[in-house]
Image: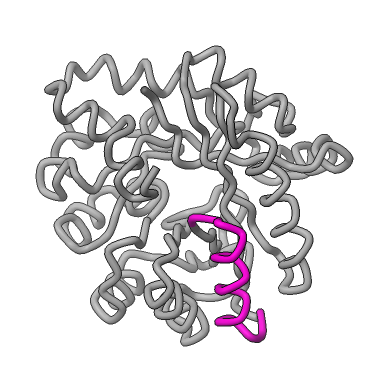
């Protein structure tokens, strides 16, 4: 089994324009067209089983429309062989956060995505702390972009290692996930300050940027039980990143934990 814990899809009517805008902003090459069907094809190319899709709210007013799209995806793929499982999104400007968390639970959604850069808010802002504490209360997974975002070059990093370390220690939530291996382009700081803490790392958009030695160094310190295979598809191809990980010739127990077992446990699949 292969589970990609970090992917993105968009409604058909805005997929092309969204992909084009993000491509121009980040100078990244997309590997799908951004649609749900495009993601299914990416799963098929990789012979992967499940893609976790992560929406990002750029405005608090998008909560309901994003939630509705997530519900639609989850219903469509409930019994599919190649499955998409969508999270919901949360924005620090959302009001009635606990009410929204309960709505997410009511629809059976497993988690939420936050993105400090796209939401122009530092990760240790009291509103994110509140979101995390309510997610902990209601047993909802939280995944955040961490480290540098290539679409925001030259701007402050909103989820740097020092700030997120304080959040991890303050909230102490065992269903908190840092995307991009704890911090995109910040591997040395991640190893020194975050590895070993009570948090998950996903591998999205990092396997082609770090070497095997750096990867294994962080995994060994952090523990393979807290690592999730992820790609950031469409910004990476699932098969390409899976092949990179496979080339490391990891112990089978470690490889299986990373590629699917940890995700199954975290999401109670």
Q: Nearer the viewer, residue 143 or 86?
A: 86
Q: What residue is drawn where x is 62% and y is 50%?
A: 151
Residue 107: say if magenta: yes
Q: Is residue 170 left or right of residue 136?
A: left
Q: What residue is drawn where x is 52% and y is 84%?
A: 127
Q: What residue is drawn where x is 61% and y is 32%?
A: 234
Q: Nearer the viewer, residue 86 or 188?
A: 86
Q: Is residue 44 above or below residue 188?
A: above
How far from the left and from the top, in percent, is residue 225?
19, 44
Q: Is residue 131 left or right of residue 189?
A: right
Q: Quadrant of residue 84?
A: top right
Q: Is residue 118 above or below residue 182?
A: below
How far from the left and from the top, in percent, is residue 18?
78, 43
Q: Nearer the viewer, residue 157 or 245?
A: 245
Q: What residue is drawn where x is 57% and y is 64%?
A: 117
Residue 84: say if magenta: no
How far from the left and from the top, in percent, is residue 53?
58, 43
Q: Quadrant of residue 261?
A: top left
**In what quadrant of the picture does the C terminus appear?**
top left
Residue 104 in view, yes or no: yes
**In what quadrant of the picture does the N terminus appear?**
top left
How far from the left and from the top, in percent, is residue 180?
40, 46
Q: Is residue 185 above or below residue 143?
A: above
Q: What's drawn in magenta, residue-wise?
A: 94-110
């Amino acid at each position: 089994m292969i589970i990609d814990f970090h992917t993105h899809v968009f409604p058909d009517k805005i997929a092309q324009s969204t992909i084009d805008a993000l491509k121009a902003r980040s100078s990244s090459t997309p590997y799908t067209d951004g649609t749900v069907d495009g993601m299914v094809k990416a799963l098929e190319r990789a012979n992967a089983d499940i893609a976790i899709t992560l929406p990002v709210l750029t405005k608090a007013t998008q909560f309901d429309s994003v939630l509705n799209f997530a519900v639609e995806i989850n219903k469509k793929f409930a019994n599919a062989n190649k499955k998409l499982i969508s999270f919901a999104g949360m924005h620090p400007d959302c009001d009635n956060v606990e009410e929204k968390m309960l709505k997410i639970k009511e629809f059976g959604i497993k988690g939420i995505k936050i993105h400090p850069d796209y939401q122009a808010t530092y990760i240790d802002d009291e509103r994110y702390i509140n979101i995390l504490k309510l997610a902990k209360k209601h047993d909802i997974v939280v995944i955040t972009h961490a480290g540098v975002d290539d679409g925001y070059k030259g701007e402050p990093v909103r989820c740097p290692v020092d700030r997120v370390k304080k959040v991890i220690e303050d909230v102490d939530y065992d269903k908190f996930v840092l995307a991009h291996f704890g911090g995109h382009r910040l591997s040395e700081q991640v190893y020194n300050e975050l590895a070993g803490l009570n948090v998950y790392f996903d591998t999205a958009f990092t396997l082609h940027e770090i070497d095997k030695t750096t990867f294994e160094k962080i995994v060994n310190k952090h523990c393979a039980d807290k690592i999730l295979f992820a790609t950031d598809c469409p910004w990476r191809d699932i098969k390409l990143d899976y092949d990179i990980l496979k080339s490391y010739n990891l112990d089978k127990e470690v490889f299986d934990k990373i590629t699917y077992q940890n995700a199954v446990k975290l999401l109670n699949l």
